[in-house]
Amino acid sequence: MEVKFFCPRWGFENVAWEDFLPRVKQAGYAGIEWFPQVSTAESDEVPTLLRQQGLAHIIVMTVNRQWCDVDEYLNYLDEDLQRLLGIGAGTLPPLFLSVQPGREYFTAGQKEACIGICREAELRTGIPIYLETHRNKWTYAAHATLPVLQKHPELSLTLDISHWYCVSESYLEDQAEAVDAAIAHAKHVHARVGHMEGPQVVDPAFTEYQEALQAHLTVWDRWVNAMEKSGHAAVTFTPEFGPPPYLPMAGRPIDPQQEQWRLNLWIKNLLQTRYQPHLHE
């Protein structure tokens, strides 16, 4: 089974694509994960540039327009999915979309409406849609997501366990059923290391964060093994350490963009070393 890593565009939006993509390629990533903006020119241009570099892409999205009520949100969700799923058509379509759904206060019926819209878009285009575990969305916590997964065995997740650790102020030792379900439903992983009091550690190599790192590695190990046992040809990770304010500056005289790049490359190299030898035995 192959392990593929995708570089986030998040934090590098001001870097020209012609400079960014060769750097991604040289660092050994298989592609990028990005949130296309409204610009039609960018949406047309980037798939061509990616193809020239031999890179693939994942699209991550949330509805970031202002909406007045849930019905308006659902309309925007449908419109945005239609636009984003069409990017790269005939050139280089996305491997899948990672959708941050709704808000944490959505009712059961409103969650069902989100799922229905995503499912229809997936069936219409043939491009998979994964729901991302994320604070501020209705996938914000383990206990809130578990009932949805139990009702919908067909749902696929982008699993970012750092959000759940932060929300619950624990490493979910007492919510094993929800963690098991998330691992079973996960098809992609966002590999950021958070902790019980925040979404991102200063540096996962620091001694004081070894408990947090191990909590994430335990989940990722289980997921990789489950994907291998179920016959998947590849697994995909996006190292997703973010820019400020995710990145704690703490008065340090550092270039935040370079520090973000370093942290993501550190976690990529750690996971590549950890998984590749085992998977190719």
Image: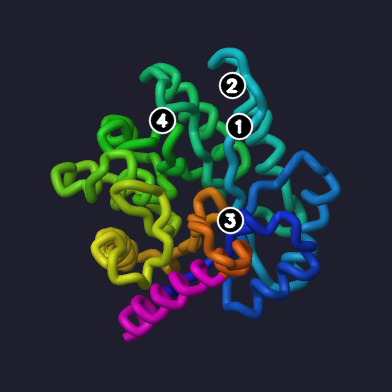
- Residue at (62% x, 28% y) in the render: 78
Which label number is shown at residue 63? 1
In 3D space, how far apart are the residues under numbered discs 3 and 2 (Cα atoms)? 25 Å
In 3D space, how far apart are the residues under numbered discs 2 and 4 (Cα atoms)? 14 Å
Q: Amino acid at mark 1?
A: Val
Q: Amino acid at mark 2?
A: Tyr
254 vs 125, nearest the viewer: 254
Task: Please state the horizontal and vertical placement of residue 244, each as a whole percent of the image.
Answer: 56, 52
- Disc 2 crowd, CA 10 A, few/some/many (<14, 14-19, 20+): some
Residue with the mark numbered 4: 138
Occupied quadrant, residue 190: bottom left
Q: Nearer the viewer, mark 3 or mark 2?
A: 2
Report the side of 246 relative to 59 (left or right): left
Which span of residues is magenta-colored? 262-281
Report the side of 46 relative to 269 (left or right): right
Q: Nearer the viewer, mark 4 or mark 3?
A: 4
In the rendered image of this protein, does residue 212 appear above or below residue 59?
Answer: below
Does the CB distance between marks 2 and 1 fall below 8 Å?
yes
Q: Amino acid at mark 4?
A: Trp
Task: Please state the horizontal and vertical placement of residue 138, each as a whole percent of the image.
Answer: 41, 30
In the rendered image of this protein, does residue 65 appear above or below residue 19?
Answer: above
- Disc 4 crowd, CA 10 A, few/some/many (<14, 14-19, 20+): many
**Residue 151 in sight here:** no
Q: Earlier in the sequence, mark 4 or mark 1?
A: 1
Residue with the mark numbered 2: 73
Q: Earlier in the sequence, mark 3 or mark 2?
A: 2
Does the CB distance between marks 1 and 3 fall below 8 Å?
no
In 3D space, how far apart are the residues under numbered discs 2 and 1 (Cα atoms)? 7 Å
